[in-house]
Image: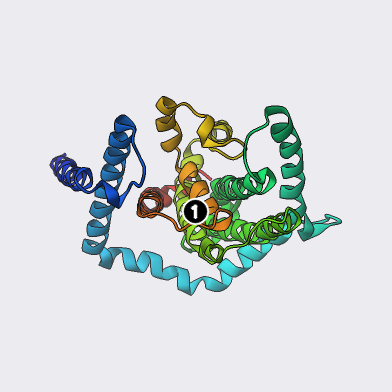
Amino acid sequence: MGSKLKYIAIWSILTALLLFIFIYNTWLVFENETDLHWKSMRLFTISGFMSLTIIIIVSAIYKWKAITPYLAKLFKYQPLLYQLVRRDFKAKYKRSVLGILWTILNPLFTMIILTIVFSTLFRFDIENYPVYLLSGQIVFSFFSESTNMAMTSVLNGASMIKKVNMPKYIFPLSRLLSSLVNFTLSLVALILVMVLTQSSFHLTMLLMIVPIIYIFIFSLGVGLILSAAVVFFRDMMYLYGILITALTYLTPIFYPISIIPEHFRLVISLNPMYHFVEYFRTVSIYGGMPTIWQNIVCLTLAFVSVAVGLFVFYKKQDQFILHI
């Protein structure tokens, strides 16, 4: 109990210190933000998350000798990881006539349907709406697909877990990597639509790797938490489906953030996927350089997610054998 209070006290002090720094140096995170309430809430939120990140890093360094063997096993089982990723990727398109082409066709067909519905009926004033829609769709689809696959990975790998002593986190990791391959191929669909709609190509597209890394790390953390939780609570599969539906509408995928009233934008900003999607669009279709604020938020969300995910998974993995 005393240890928990110590961490809470350290977190509170660090949060207050960072908040003080940001208040007097708002240029570090904001460019043209005028709403005082909105600015204050964002500063407090990011200060809290950054404090948590610092505590996690320091704790990890302090306990590095205990953590290293746990993560080092990944190198030993690289061939197995490769085989699992290959199996998952091939299984997805098994007995399909078009096979891997569905990775490109699926987002294209979805984009066409949503473009007809939203750009025609709602008439959103968004330049090159198909590209706007598809860029957000493929990012969110990667998160949704990868975390859903990771969630059931431990359950599906029960027979192997019971027979072989291996790092169990290799199962959710393999699902994430399989989804990453699908996501990489779906970028072909985005480039194809940009060519057909005569969109501009920018040098900042080379920076797309940055938000992709952020999203992958964040999704890995969520996947680790879900894969551990569903072993003990099967209803999590259904609850997460509801959460994903809610996140779909809380993320500006098919609508612009400008239609959301100012006093409701705080709710949108609490959705991590909003930040990842906006970062990806900034470098891929807008040709802009990501701000310090965007990098701080995305890096913090990704790091906290994977740190919490590893902690939860590590604490619960020895009990998996009793419930799978």
Residue at figure coordinates x 49%, y 35% from the top left: 233
The outermost residue toward the right is: 97
Which quadrant would the N terminus be assigned to in this image? top left
Q: Tell me the colour scheme of the image.
A: rainbow
Residue at figure coordinates x 36%, y 50% from the top left: 293
Task: Please say whether residue 9 is visible from this viewpoint.
Answer: yes
Q: Give whichever of 69, 20 is nearer the camera.
A: 20
Helix, strand or loop at label 1? It is: helix
Does residue 211 lie above or below 18 as drawn? below
Residue 52 x, y percent position in the rendering = 27, 48
> Which quadrant holds residue 99?
bottom right
Q: Give whichever of 240, 83 is nearer the camera.
A: 240
> Which quadrant holds residue 69?
bottom left
Check disc 1: other Cα within 10 Å, few if <14, some if 14-19, many if 20+: many
Q: Give whichever of 232, 205 is nearer the camera.
A: 205
Residue at figure coordinates x 22%, y 58% from the top left: 58
Residue 76 x, y percent position in the rendering = 47, 74
Residue 132 x, y percent position in the rendering = 62, 46
Q: Give whichever of 7, 208 is nearer the camera.
A: 208
Residue under label 1, please give it: 215
Which amino acid type corresponds to the residue marked 1 in the rendered image? Ile
Does residue 242 lie above or below 217 as drawn? above
| Left-right relation of 99 to 174 | right
Residue 73 x, y percent position in the rendering = 43, 69
